Amino acid sequence: MKKHLILFVFLLFSIAIQAQKIEFKILDNNTSKPIKNATVFNRLDSLIANTNANGIFFIEEEALPLLVTINALNYNDLQTKLSKDDKSNILYLSSAAEMLVEVLVRSSLIETKTLNFPGAVDVISSKDLERVDASNLVQIFNTIPGVYANQGALNTNKLNIRGIGSRSQYSTNRIQAYFEGIPLTTGEGELTLDDFDAETISSIEIIKGPASSLYGAGLGGAINLYGKSIGEEYSNLKVESLFGSYNLNKNTISAGIGSKRSSIFVNFSDLRSDGYRDNGKYRRSSGFLNYGLKITENDHLNILANFTQLKAFIPSSINYSDYLNNPTSAAFTWKASQGYESYDRGMFGVSYEHSFSQNLKNTSSVFVNFRDAYEPRPFDILEENRIATGFRTKFNFESEIFKLPSELSFGIAYYKEWYEISNYQNLYRDFENLGSIQGVVINKNDQDRQYANFFAQLNLELSDRWNLESGFNLNTTNYKLTDLFEGDTVDQTGDYSFKTIFSPRVAVLFELNSNKNLYASISHGFSNPTVAETLTPDGAINTDLQPETGVNYEIGFKGNWLKNRLYTQISFYSIQVEDLLVAERVAEDRYVGANVGKTDHNGIEFQANYRIDLKRDITVNPYLNGSLNFFRFDKFIDSDIEYSGNRLPGVPKSTVNLGVDLLYKKSLSIHANYLAVGEIPLNDANSDYSDNYQLLNFKASYNFMIANNWNISFNAGVNNILDEKYASSILPNAVGFGGQAPRSYYPGNPRNYFGGLGFKYQF
């Protein structure tokens, strides 16, 4: 009798224990079939469950809610929060190969796969940023076909997309850029991206050519940066240090706290380097904040802020003889004057998203940017103060037109900038070995710049296989110049408004079959002259100067192969630019603009990404991309010299980027990358070229748990393994003053090393 009683009590106890466990089921996202042998880890990376043949696993009720990571062979990891209150405890994993086409384009009308976007767009993810060292965000852009980054120094970078902006000498222009919708491009069209830390970026989208009606129709394209945030019910504190050649040192501390309703992520970094060349010391301190609040199911608030303080000395460009024989040298006058740039730069924005209904949503934002700069140069000392503010509002509406599913977006963006500039004499020659000494003012003026963009875009699903996208951007731009300098008889005061520019875009997408699409598009873009370019040699405003405009014609193919393991893309495009803006250099820091020609930007871009799962825990991702550039002057006569038919300076004839990523579990990653860059014309006459070059880079990272809630990580790498001698940037159309040879070259760093250490505490 006692034995039966004990057995009965044991059965009741077992049933009670089983009742205290919650059942979860894991299915394939496409087939809904159960996934067996999937593993479930808690946030300390401890194994807590495995799925059975039916895809089922159990978690004790008292352990819920619980943040877990689920992985299975040939599937992407899923991080999610398990809860006993879930109405459905069914979880879905997507095929690992789908990541090749599942990358979302957030800057489209709605989030869409790159595969389904009817244009050339590339997305740099946070994982892509892990391929390179964290000292320089801009270097990752050279892995994108059609984009070329000149890197003269950590603080001397310029980008061109499809050759647009390649003739710019010192800065990136003709590209519209945004950080979570906040404009980064100034009122004059100049862009600086090297102020931002890779640790604060979740993704970067590059739309090539004037293919975005929603983001200003920039002639070169648009770059959209998205800030890092923290996941729900997930919090951590992270400290990292990076060391490298030339006394490179970067220290970073970040923290994030997430809950059901809100999340906050903050990051602070300090970056220092002596540089490879003389007069090349660099120091930058940055702070970043990203705060999100879910007010209701229909209302979301986001606050974004970034502050940068920089002081960076400038070695500048050197002539060919010094480039070959003494590449560590700085330009003589820049070294003698100890030239540098120093500034405080801030960005602050607030955005609010409200859903009126399931079909109608509005996102609005306001922002303020500022930059206070001081730059001693051999020819003068420049002082700048810039404040910009504005707003952007966009409505998204889903409906039907003639019974066809459609999505409509429309809105307005307004930008207002106050810019003060003063130039002073630099008396460094009168005070030997003391560097730059400020003298009397030689120029001073105020500039008020403003523009408004009205935009609309319609996506229409014509059939199961045809999609139409059409839109436009309407721009009005004007500025006011107030000459405050009384030391001469020239009065540059005046107002100027550029003509209103209408930039339409039409694109179609045709689905050949599942995950294989053809697209074609025609789009218009523009670039306004800078204030300096509108001034004549006499100081008057040139009212005849027109914006640079262009039309982009493009066809392409995007396809997925081998059961979604291979993704390929190829684009053929032609950008026809008219009213080419040419800035003629009439003094060391003075340029005069003119509309003097046309250019043809014809090119081919291609890429392929492949994923190989060798075993459950080992993944290999080889990739290949490149571009063939046929950029020439169609019609260009400058100072009675014929340049028609010549290649555009400042952009390589071709680029090829080849690499492989090896991943083992979530602990070890190895990245190898090979970049081949073709020769680059140095001037409009094509009389000189820089040599082609190849760079081979390597990085390895390893992380593991050392105690409960504690994680430690290591990374190390080598840049330019082959120790290639190359020009990392060139100065197009450089002019030699005082009988000196033109200073066209910025020497690239020889073989150099880096390593890092990090600690992360999760709570």
Image: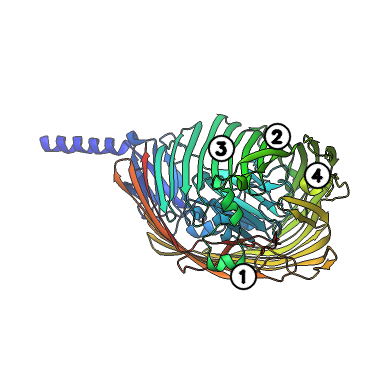
The tag earlier along the polypeptide, 2 or 4, is 2
Q: Earlier in the sequence, mark 4 or mark 3?
A: 3
Q: Amino acid at mark 2?
A: Gly
Q: Element at badge 4?
A: strand
At a point 70% along the width and 63% down the height, the residue shown is 739
Mark pair 1, 2: CA separation:
41 Å
**On screen, 466 above or below 232?**
below
Q: Residues within 10 Å of mark 3 (few under 14, many from 20)?
A: many
Left or right: 710 in relation to 460:
left
How many labels, in total? 4
**Residue named by callout 4:** 474
Query: From the image, which quarter does the N terminus lie in?
Result: top left
Q: Give the mark, 1 or 2, whose residue is nearer the N terminus.
A: 2
The x and y percentages for residue 665 are: 37, 56
Which of discs 4 and 3 lies nearer the camera? The answer is 3
Seen from this angle, which residue lies furthest top?
295
Residues at marks 3 and 1 touching, judged by CB atoms closer than 8 Å: no
Is residue 1 in view from this perspective? no
Indicate which label's residue lies in the foreground, 4 or 1. 1
Upstream in sequence: badge 3 or badge 2: 3
Label 4 to label 1, Cα distance in Å?
38 Å
Q: CA distance from mark 2 to mark 4?
A: 17 Å
Q: Nearer the viewer, residue 276 or 19?
A: 276
Label 3 belongs to which residue?
306
Q: Secondary structure at mark 1?
A: loop
Residue 390 image label: 2
Dot 4 amino acid type: Leu
Residue pictured at 35% horizontal, 52% vertical? 52
Question: How many residues crowd mark 2 within 10 Å: few (<14), some (14–19), many (20+)?
Answer: many
Q: Is residue 4 visible?
A: yes
Towards the viewer: 448 or 460: 448
